[in-house]
Image (cartoon, helix red, strand yellow):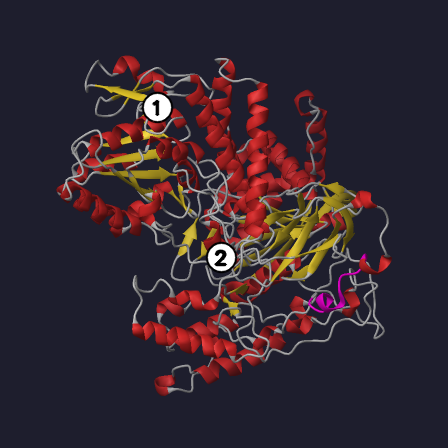
Amino acid sequence: MAKGDPGVTTRGRRAAPRSKRAAAAAGDPELVQLLTPEGERVETSVGPDGTEYRVDFTDEEYRGLYRDLVLVRKLDAEATALQRQGELGLWASLLGQEAAQVGSGRALRSQDMAFPTYREHGVLYCRGIDPIMPLGLFRGVDQGGWDPNEFKFNMYTIVIGAQTLHATGYAMGVAMDGKTGGDDGEAVIAYFGDGATSQGDVNESFVWASVFNAPLVFFCQNNQYAISEPLERQTRVPLYRRAGGFGFPGVRVDGNDVLASYAVTRHALDNARHGQGPSLIEAYTYRMGAHTTSDDPTRYRIASEVEAWQAKDPIARMKAFLTRQQIADADFFAAVDEQARTESVHLRERVLAMPDPEPATMFDHVYPNGSPELDEQRAQFSRYLESFEGSAH
Amino acid sequence: MSRIKEFNLPDLGEGLTEGEILAWLVKVGDVIELNQPIVEVETAKAAVEIPAKWAGQVRSIFHPEGSTVEVGTPIIAIDTDPGAGPIEESTTDTPSAASLAAVEVAPSEGAIEPGLIGGPAPGGRTAVLVGYGPRTTAAKRRPRRADVPSPTPPASSADHGVAVGDKPASIATIPAPQVHDRRNGAGLVLAKPPVRKLARDLGVDLGVVTGSGPLGSITREDVQRAASGSATAAEPLTVAAPTTVAASFGADREQRIPVKGVRKLTAENMSRSAFTAPHVTEFLTVDVTRAMKALDRLRGRREWRDVRVSPLLLVAKAVLLAVRRHPMVNSTWAGDEIVVKDYVNLGIAAATERGLIVPNIKDAGRLSLRELADAMTDLVQTAKAGRTSPAAMSGGTLTITNVGVFGVDTGTPILPPGESAILAFGAVRELPWVHKGKVRPRQVTTLGLSFDHRIIDGELGSKFLRDIGDFLADPEAALLAWT
């Protein structure tokens, strides 16, 4: 899909009585959904505040979203395999959450800024960033630093919920710089999970973003588990309703529906860029894999629950839709699979070829312009390393 | 050489040092693809499948299922270009000698202080960087100290896969049983928190330690002294040899079997229960001829035609009905309170190839006899197939152990931790028995009931056992009288 293409329309609020269209959301009146688990398109879905969500993609754009989903899943699976083979120290798989990430990632405009957790590999991919970028961090050969301004994509943040504060401050800066108020305005999106909503950081962010009307979209991927802790230990109300208490709108979207995730995010971002303040999106989804490769989910959840979510798979429903509507045929699906295979093998080869870091590089990014003290430390450290016999460094 | 690639067991979970091979998913000679799952490995954190790092043909598998392998040790060799013809033998069937040294060479448990990463932690677990590992495995962190002695590798490399007798790890390294001190919360013993932790780590019951500190408080030295004493006392319980392993004796005519998996869990549970819950066992011998006849009549009914009906079913029913009359037996001792349960998760001890497991039937008291029969059949079949889930084995409230299937009359069962009563059901034998004033051949069995005397006094335990016996002596009358 072409970047910057709106591809989405939303109509005015309270356009029609809700009851008539609520059934469209597959029996869950709280969930915005445009593609059912069976692959049926829903023309319009209404949010809790009456906003009507719809998408209007071309066939090429539909196929593009499918390709994104498959590629993101395959690259993620490759990284998981690399960890199992001892080539990565750790990996946080996004399996099951592809639609929430691709939908929201594709909804970003080029000027928008994203603040990820450590699981946003799909958003990173949709930003057009080389998927190798975070793998150095997980391989332990770099510190995961990159220039956030260059990619409009902040560093992966491991501390739970901390990036929401960074995003809030950044978004307040965007507003103070006068970059909001038009179609070309800048919006900010902060990713976090259901577990993070129990963090002080996230709640403080809600307060600050709300009272300063920051152009910020809080995008919560509710994957049902904070590592092993189920959602019912995080909240007694649906997470999206928390926004009401802080004074901004909240909406729950089917996070396994790439179309609805796109529509809801695009709408929220556009509100933000036009100066209408923050909003909260709860993308209701499920982490099909482990929290990270160090986790064993079979210890805290039952197989039947995983199977129930398997039936809501984001890629299967998109494939069913494309097939049924004759938007794509078997040749297309085979070509996408082949592309995914090629790209994952390429990624594997590049990961295995990553050089070990030079020890002295740890001094490089302490201060933006260095310091005499730091130079002295670097020199000392280099002399120390050179004192070893046969030292390569 | 570069054609044959050896795959070393990686650190699968942020700082682990070893893993247990659960199952090989490929065999020697298989042609495999990149990322095809080849082996299932269980570490202290998770059981995971490892995908193949290279495509090719499996040349050698270095460790059998069930073996514990150190991180960094080769586990499989893959010929990455099998179509290119034969290769010289020297590089094929044995992993490099240096890597062999790491196999099964675990530093002795005492080398790492309790509480440090890599040392023993509460409940027989091993402290790791993030959270605790499970009870059932013994994976260790890399020791922090450099002075851990490194045992020499087995001399022979030809039989490295199954050299049970050569293993340097001896049964003597089994940690002392972990005894939970339930009196801590009540404040009956004086000890500083670090001392309490040390006691917990070492499995010392502070309640039985005499304090030498101020005001009779227990010191670090007291705990250490008690620990060295209790370890020897507990030894006989931990060295029960599994019967399924074929004997393979070394030159000293002794066999050393590593304690792990189900055996280890059983040992921990039994030691914990035996040393915390004061058990009493009572016996009752019952004429079950009428019950056996009732079973025959049940089998003859059309709707029961396809149902597996065993004497154990009636015993289960008897237990469930008797619990209803004496709810107190279905309870847990929780230190300062007794938790009585309105539901019965009925455990059935099952001997499987992997060892003793005790899955339970959830809320068995609500099941009809037919549902109970189906649940028991299902439970036994699942257990025999080795597919019993952890959930099915947790939460039991009362257990039956059917020792009769082994042809013995009764036993004094040890309570599963957290339960207050367990019934042993002996063999049903035809014996001379006084029936209606005359000696007759009758079907007779012996029941053995162990119960936790902290909760259940002799009177209650006897009434409970008597009711089970009454039901088995005359099920119809008991049903009419009680339900």
Secondary structure at badge 2 equals loop
What residue is disc 2 on?
Answer: B456
Marks 2, 1 in one chain: no
Mark in front: 2 vs 1 = 1
Q: Residues within 10 Å of mark 2 (few under 14, many from 20)?
A: some
Secondary structure at badge 1 equals loop
Give the camera-side residue of A204 and A272.
A272
- Magenta range is B92-102
Q: Quadrant of residue A142?
A: bottom left
Q: Is residue B67 visible?
A: no
Query: Which percent across, then down, holds residue B395?
Result: 51, 48
For disc 1, the chain is: A
Residue A172 part of the magenta segment: no
The answer to whether A349 is drawn above or below residue B68 in the figure is above
The answer to whether B119 is drawn above or below residue B450 in the figure is below
Amino acid type shown at disc 1: Asp
Query: Which percent across, then down, holds residue B115?
Result: 47, 71
What residue is disc 1 on?
Answer: A28
